[in-house]
């Protein structure tokens, strides 16, 4: 028997909503573009659990025989060096980072936790580790415990319960939004299908999507697709220019995900600096954290 087909979509996670049929979204001070930069800090385990899963295109060097020092240490470069360069550049341009931090980073790198908090970053949850992705193969209770352990680790490390969630490798099961809302999350970054926030449909709690621009994720562009760093800089600028033009009619969101082990390399960081300078020299750009954007959107939804 064929699957039931409906106008728009085949699932109930949110309402289908073409941007041309929505009301007008106004950002603070009539900004055209809300710019959100998510900086991901994720720990690559030496020996992940046997039943854990991650995608073959998870970034970094391909897995080799244990101990794979090159792969592990390449990823840890972001924690030891790259993160400081990335945060310096964001601060230079007046952008507060939204740091997606997994549980093992929060537990094992207390200096980084304190450093990010001292610089005014928002810290959101990012699962348990880069080696453990949520999939529909997880039993429901296992996934619920996974989410809870991530939130507990960040709450203990930071003193605050995170408001947002970005799954490792954007991974979810068919029940993840409901479990996130149940756990008290206010927004999720895994759905990459829009240029404005939007409400998710959940039986309990208010959960919103903060859509990231997947093709501008430095891991996807620079590592998986092998885009040159100069072309990546131009992609950031060109995307912003289009959003800025469209934002004259209704507010747009440019949310990008950066990995310090990639973009924090000394030969790449200058390109990020140049792209952000291009964006922030324009009037009508609101550099904000994920929570700031969702707070505003919830209180000031698009007006008819």
Image: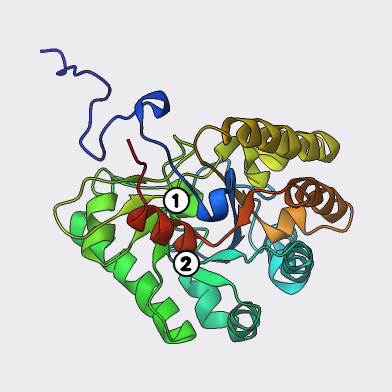
User: Residue at position x 77%, y 59% from top?
Assistant: 264
In this rendering, is residue 11 above or below 201?
A: above
* Residue occupying the point 41% across, 47% down: 171
Q: Position of residue 206 (x, y in %)?
A: 25, 57
Q: In this rendering, does residue 78 appear at all? A: yes
**Which sits in the foreground, 252 or 177?**
252
Seen from the viewer's position, the closer of residues 210 and 85 is: 210
The residue sitting at 59% across, 43% down in the picture is 32
Query: Do the residues bearing badges 2 and 1 touch, measured as CB atoms within 8 Å?
Result: yes
Mark carried by residue 221: none
Image height of 225 relative to 61, above or below: above
**Residue 243 coordinates in the image, percent (x, y):** 61, 35
User: Which dot marks residue 189?
Assistant: 1
Q: Is residue 55 left or right of residue 11?
A: right
Q: Quadrant of residue 219?
A: top right
Q: Residue furthest top?
A: 1
Q: Quadrant of the C terminus?
A: top left
Q: Is residue 44 visible?
A: no
Task: Give the image location of residue 73, x and y in percent.
Answer: 72, 65
Helix, strand or loop status at disc 2: strand
Q: Which residue is the site of mark 2?
A: 124
In the rendered view, does 118 fall on the left or right side of 231? left
Task: Estimate the x, y position of residue 141 in percent, counting from the top left.
Answer: 19, 61
Return the residue nearer the eye: 175 or 85.
85
Q: Residue reaching furthest left?
A: 1
Tell me the quarter of the picture where residue 278 sits: top right
Q: Identify the secondary structure beneath mark 1.
A: loop
Q: Quadrant of the N terminus?
A: top left
Question: If you read the primary sequence from the N terminus, does the residue marked by circle 2 or circle 1 appear first?
Answer: 2
Residue at (85, 37) in percent of width and height: 230
Q: Determine whether 44 is above or below 207 in the image.
A: below
């Amino acid at each position: 028997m064929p699957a039931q087909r409906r106008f728009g979509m085949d699932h109930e996670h949110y309402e289908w909503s073409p941007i041309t049929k929505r009301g007008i979204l106004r950002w603070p001070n009539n900004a055209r573009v809300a710019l959100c930069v998510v900086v991901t800090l994720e720990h690559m385990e030496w020996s992940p659990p046997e039943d854990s899963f991650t995608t073959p295109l998870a970034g970094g060097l391909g897995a080799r025989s244990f101990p794979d020092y090159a792969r592990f240490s390449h990823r840890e470069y972001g924690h030891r060096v790259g993160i400081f360069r990335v945060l310096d550049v964001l601060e230079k341009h007046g952008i507060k980072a939204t740091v997606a931090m997994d549980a093992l980073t929060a537990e094992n790198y207390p200096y980084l936790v304190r450093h990010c908090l001292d610089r005014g970053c928002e810290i959101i949850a990012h699962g348990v580790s880069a080696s453990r992705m949520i999939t529909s193969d997880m039993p429901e209770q296992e996934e619920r415990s996974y989410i809870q352990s991530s939130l507990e680790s960040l709450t203990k490390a930071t003193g605050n319960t995170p408001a947002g969630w970005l799954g490792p490798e954007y991974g979810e099961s068919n029940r993840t939004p409901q479990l996130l809302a149940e756990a008290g999350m206010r927004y999720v970054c895994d759905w990459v299908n829009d240029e404005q926030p939007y409400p998710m449909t959940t039986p309990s709690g208010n959960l919103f999507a903060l859509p990231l621009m997947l093709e501008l994720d430095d891991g996807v562009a620079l590592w998986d697709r092998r885009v040159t760093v100069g072309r990546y800089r131009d992609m950031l600028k060109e995307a912003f220019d289009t959003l800025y033009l469209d934002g004259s009619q209704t507010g747009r969101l440019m949310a990008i995900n950066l990995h310090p082990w990639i973009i924090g390399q000394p030969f790449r960081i200058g390109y990020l600096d140049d792209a952000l300078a291009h964006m922030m020299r324009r009037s009508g750009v609101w550099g904000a954290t994920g929570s700031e954007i969702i707070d505003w959107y919830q209180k000031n939804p698009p007006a008819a």
